[in-house]
Image (cartoon, rainbow, N blue to C red):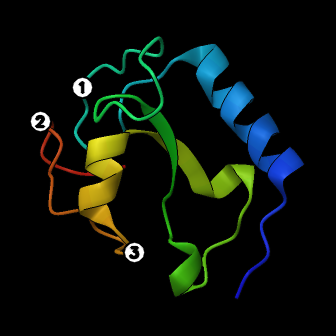
Amino acid sequence: MIKRDSANRHRMRARIKRDQPACHICGKAIDYTLPHLDPWSFVIDHVVPLAKGGADAMGNVKAAHRQCNSKKRARIVAPIVRRSGSLD
């Protein structure tokens, strides 16, 4: 099991939240003021999941809705396709 560094995770969340990007999975805007358990709230997603060998590092995380991230699970490609037609 990969050990996560909670201080590092906090820094990654803060850095992404500062720029307030859209969800990288569905492409829609994220309301960064929602409570953390709301399905449309902000979470960080590991683009290459930790379970698939991805790094717990800034270069492997992006903003996502809690609901979109939940549907993606530990897959590299999400079942949700951005309106642009492709994932980042």
- Residue identified by numbered label 3: 74
Report whether 47 appears left or right of 27. right
Labels 1 and 2 touching (C-beta < 8 A)? yes
Q: Secondary structure at mark 1?
A: loop
- Asked whether 86 or 53 is in front, the reply is 53
Mark with earlier residue (3, 2): 3
- Image location of residue 56, percent across then percent down: 71, 64
Name which quarter of the figure residue 24 lies in. top left
Name which quarter of the figure residue 55 lies in. bottom right
Q: Is residue 52 above or below residue 71?
A: below
Distance of label 1 from label 2 (alpha carbons): 9 Å
- Image location of residue 34, percent across then percent down: 41, 17
Q: Residue at x 52, y 17 (%)?
A: 20
- Residue identified by numbered label 2: 83
Amino acid type at image mark 2: Arg
Disc ID at residue 59: none
